[in-house]
Image (cartoon, rainbow, N blue to C red):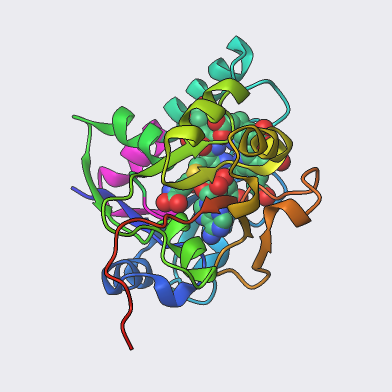
Amino acid sequence: MGRVICAGLGPGDPELMSLKAARTIGAARHVAYFRKEGRPGQARQIVEGMLHPAAIEYPMEYPVTTELPFDSPDYTDALARFYDDWASRLAALAASEDVVVLCEGDPFFYGSFMHLHSRLQGRVAVEVIPGITGMTGCWTATGTPITWGDDVLTVLMGTLPEDDLVRHMQQADALVVMKTGRNLPRVRRALERAGRLDQAWLVERGTMPNQRVARLAEVDPTDCPYFAIVLVHGHGRRPEIHE
Ligand SMILES: C[C@@]1(CC(=O)O)C2=NC(=C\c3[nH]c(c(CCC(=O)O)c3CC(=O)O)Cc3[nH]c(c(CC(=O)O)c3CCC(=O)O)/C=C3\N/C(=C\2)[C@@H](CCC(=O)O)[C@]3(C)CC(=O)O)/[C@H]1CCC(=O)O
Ligand SMILES: C[S@@+](CC[C@H](N)C(=O)[O-])C[C@H]1O[C@@H](n2cnc3c(N)ncnc32)[C@H](O)[C@@H]1O
């Protein structure tokens, strides 16, 4: 009996992977990972040069990402069938041998693996190796701490409606907005309405080779990759510096 093991890979720099993830990936004979059709896949790129020479690869290509509205029935149906199909294929493989699924960041933090995890329950043994989240890599890239004292950190998705974004942004101390991508113009408008735009940073591809860190007010919001995060640092309670 094998297992399905999901390895969290951290935010992008392979050096930020756990020893357990690295050891598991190097030993794996079956390696699956998500990717957009026609792209190398972020998770696969992180493990370049680490796979066992005999490893068999299983790219799991999304049927759609932005081609259909994500709240339409066609999108939901296409993804449900895609996850059902891959859950069955991984369960069949794991009947005899371990299968390692690669996941950028931490698997249980908005990770695509969660859709397989729920479908695999009761069918096969599943293990998850945690990873450093993308947002951790991003706030470290800004060189400034994200939360102090009793700051409340709010994590928002750029896919939310603008009024919901504004409401949460007004209440937040420190702020993380994920899934910016094509949603960045709406996120920028919401920050402006909440009076937080001047403090906001955009981190594209945090800890990856082509990382970019910029003040959000100074970038073109219509040109933003999927792997990008907006941050507002907290300024909470802390002892004064005496020198
Ligand atoms: C529809 C949309 C809405 C939304 O985010 O809610 C959405 N993906 C969008 C865009 C998009 N996704 C990708 C690219 C190309 C990136 C590139 O190649 O550059 C682009 C942009 C593009 O196509 O231009 C690839 C991709 N997607 C995921 C990963 C894995 C990962 O990140 O771990 C990777 C990297 C694969 C790789 O490594 O290659 C994961 C997820 N994406 C989901 C949804 C969740 C499915 C939930 C469900 O089942 O319904 C899920 C499972 C998890 C989640 O997000 O909760 C959103 C539209 C936002 C917008 O409008 O911009
Ligand atoms: C589906 S979520 C996956 C999150 C992942 N499991 C994690 O722990 O960070 C994808 C979103 O995470 C964010 N993200 C993840 N890693 C990133 C990185 N290295 N740089 C910038 N954004 C990142 C982006 O906002 C992207 O749209």
* Front-lying residue, 73 or 225: 225
Q: Quadrant of ligand 1?
A: top right
Drawn side of residue 108 relative to residue 187, left or right: left
Would you say residue 44 is visible in this rendering?
yes
- Look at 41% across and 57% down and name the residue there: 235
Q: Could you say where residue 212 lies in the image, as x and y percent from the top left? A: 67, 66
Q: Could you say where residue 113 lies in the image, as x and y percent from the top left? A: 40, 41
- Look at 51% across and 62% down and name the residue there: 138
Q: How many labels sit on residues?
A: 0
- Look at 35% across and 57% down and name the residue there: 7
Picture layout, residue 190 above or below residue 215: above
- Look at 62% across and 25% down and name the residue there: 162
Which range is magenta? Answer: 87-106
Q: Is residue 104 magenta?
A: yes
- Can you name the residue that lies furthest to the bottom here? 243
Q: Could you say where residue 178 lies in the image, as x and y percent from the top left? A: 53, 44
Q: Could you say where residue 64 lies in the image, as x and y percent from the top left? A: 66, 30
Drawn side of residue 211 relative to residue 233, left or right: right
The C terminus sits in image quarter: bottom left
Would you say residue 112 is visible in this rendering?
no
- Can you name the residue that lies furthest to the front here? 242
Q: Is residue 133 magenta?
A: no
